[in-house]
Image (spheres, rainbow, N blue to C red):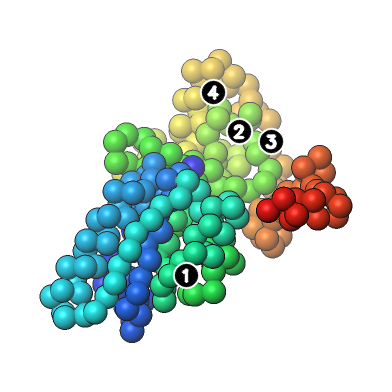
């Protein structure tokens, strides 16, 4: 899932500026799971903004809503076309912000900072797990992503700074390659360490520009698009 965290309240207030009619839009998908943008977080931010407006005698009108996923056009369009406000604050990931803005004629600003792709390690603690490189080698590394979890994204073993299973970048950060070794040992596949992973072709990552996946069986023909538009 995508992991995000709320921007500092002062930064959000600065973004609002002179706008008086503000709509907060949450996302009940990833942002809700990482406790950054679900219904509860939307309500908490709305209350904080109302309190700030009251203390500073600001005539802010703040409303709230949430959709299942901001990153799908249908839900984004539902909000964007009906929003009666001067500014939308999105409590979704960066993708959600962009979809909402495409569907809306008023500015859409991010209330969250999108961090990474990962998951919960334990209650309230989230760890980056995937670098989204577009060339997955998890079958060779015991199910642990060296691109995301190694500070240097090394593909063939640890660097010289790894000591006692910890990363030289931070003594509290486990060495990804120690974790890979432990995982392969547990799986009885240590022989995979002898395989040299070739240099990665970073064109499949973001280094090659915005990425697109096309599934031909799901792409509508021009006639199908017209039929769909007619039904809508």
Residue at the bottom extreme, as displayed = 18
Q: Nearer the viewer, mark 3 or mark 2?
A: 2
Q: Position of residue 38 (x, y in %)?
A: 36, 48
Mark 4 packing: few (<14 Cα in 10 Å), some, or many (20+)?
many
Q: Position of residue 107 (x, y in %)?
A: 48, 74
Give the residue number, with chain letter if any, for mark 4: 184
First in sequence, mark 1 or 4: give its number: 1
State whether residue 3 appears in this view.
no
First in sequence, mark 4 or 3: give its number: 4
Instruction: Please say if 183 is above or below 15.
Output: above
Which element is circle 4 on? helix
Give the residue number, with chain letter if any, for mark 1: 108
On residue 138, the disc is 2
First in sequence, mark 3 or 2: give its number: 2
The image quarter in which residue 91 lies: bottom left
Mark pair 3, 2: CA separation: 14 Å
The image quarter in which residue 47 lies: bottom left
* Residue in front for this viewpoint, 215 or 5: 215
Q: Nearer the viewer, mark 2 or mark 1?
A: 1
Q: Nearer the viewer, mark 3 or mark 1?
A: 1
Q: Residue at x 51, y 20 (%)?
A: 185
Q: Nearer the viewer, mark 2 or mark 4?
A: 2
* Residue in front for this viewpoint, 191 or 28: 28
Q: Residue at x 42, y 62 (%)?
A: 90
Mark pair 4, 3: CA separation: 15 Å
Q: Nearer the viewer, mark 4 or mark 3?
A: 4
């Amino acid at each position: 899932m995508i992991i995000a965290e709320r921007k500092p309240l002062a930064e959000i207030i600065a973004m609002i500026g002179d706008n008086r009619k503000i709509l907060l839009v949450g996302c009940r998908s990833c942002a809700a799971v990482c406790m950054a943008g679900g219904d509860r977080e939307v309500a908490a931010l709305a209350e904080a903004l109302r309190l700030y407006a009251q203390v500073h005698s600001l005539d802010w009108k703040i409303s709230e809503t949430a959709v299942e996923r901001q990153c799908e056009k249908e839900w984004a369009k539902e909000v964007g076309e009906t929003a009666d406000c001067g500014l939308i604050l999105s409590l979704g990931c960066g993708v959600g912000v962009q979809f909402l803005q495409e569907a809306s004629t008023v500015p859409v600003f991010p209330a969250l900072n999108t961090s990474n792709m990962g998951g919960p390690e334990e209650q309230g603690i989230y760890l980056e797990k995937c670098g989204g490189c577009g060339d997955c080698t998890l079958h060779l590394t015991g199910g642990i992503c060296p691109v995301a979890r190694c500070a240097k994204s090394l593909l063939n073993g640890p660097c010289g700074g790894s000591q006692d299973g910890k990363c030289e970048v931070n003594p509290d950060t486990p060495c990804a390659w120690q974790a890979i070794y432990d995982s392969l040992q547990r799986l009885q596949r240590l022989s995979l360490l002898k395989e040299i992973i070739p240099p990665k072709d970073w064109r499949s990552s973001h280094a090659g520009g915005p990425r697109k996946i096309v599934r031909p069986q799901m792409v509508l023909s021009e006639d199908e698009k017209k039929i769909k538009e007619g039904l809508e």
